[in-house]
Amino acid sequence: MDRRRLPLQLLDTVGYAVAVTAVVFLVGAGLATAAGRQPLVGAKWFMFLVGFGLLAYSAFQLRPTPKWKQDEEGGNGNGGLLGTDTNGQVGLQAAVTRLVPDDYRLPADERHSAALKLFVASVFVLVASFLMETVFGVAVAA
């Protein structure tokens, strides 16, 4: 086993989680601003709601595929909304991978699954929302 594989997998997963957290924050702040609310408060609530939605979706995707379904489909049954293209990258994952130098990129078959990365990203989003309120004092506007 390659000693570099685990740190590179961790870098790939954490990079994806940070990117998802940033996108969710920016979308939430933008929506709050468009609605005439305080951007940080709106972003905090948006992150809270989206974080739980992503957590539920990714936990659902992480379920093991039943043996009878694997036999029917002739594969592992990991398609669906988190399916990948021939390079193993779609959307935000492809953008995050392009930010990483070539020496630190992993082939698609050595990366963590998209469902696991989304699960980690949902935890990052929820932790960021929690920290915004408890550490940075972003409270509900009166």
Image (cartoon, rainbow, N blue to C red):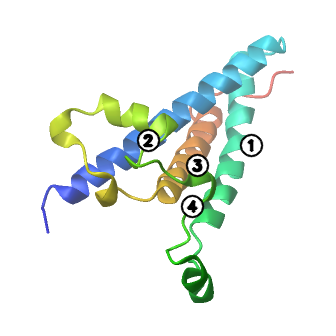
The amino acid type found where label 1 is placed reads Leu
Q: Report how far apart the C-alphas of labels 4 and 2 lie in the structure.
A: 19 Å
- Disc 3 on helix, strand or loop? helix
The earlier-in-sequence mark between 4 and 1 is 1
- Disc 4 on helix, strand or loop? loop
The earlier-in-sequence mark between 1 and 2 is 2
Q: Can you tell which mark lies on residue 122?
A: 3
The amino acid type found where label 4 is placed reads Gly
The earlier-in-sequence mark between 3 and 2 is 2
Q: Out of 94 and 13, give the one closest to the viewer.
A: 94
Q: Can you tell which mark lies on residue 118?
A: none
Image quadrant assignment for residue 102: top left
Mark 3 surroundings: few (<14), some (14-19) or many (≥20) residues within 10 A: many
The amino acid type found where label 2 is placed reads Tyr
The earlier-in-sequence mark between 1 and 3 is 1
Name the residue that disc number 1 marks.
49
Name the residue that disc number 2 marks.
16
Residue name at image x 57 percent, y 61 percent = 79
Name the residue that disc number 4 marks.
79
Image quadrant occupied by the C terminus: top right
The earlier-in-sequence mark between 3 and 4 is 4
Q: Out of 45 and 15, give the one closest to the viewer.
A: 15
Image quadrant assignment for residue 96: top left
Mark 2 surroundings: few (<14), some (14-19) or many (≥20) residues within 10 A: many
Q: Report how far apart the C-alphas of labels 1 and 2 lie in the structure.
A: 19 Å
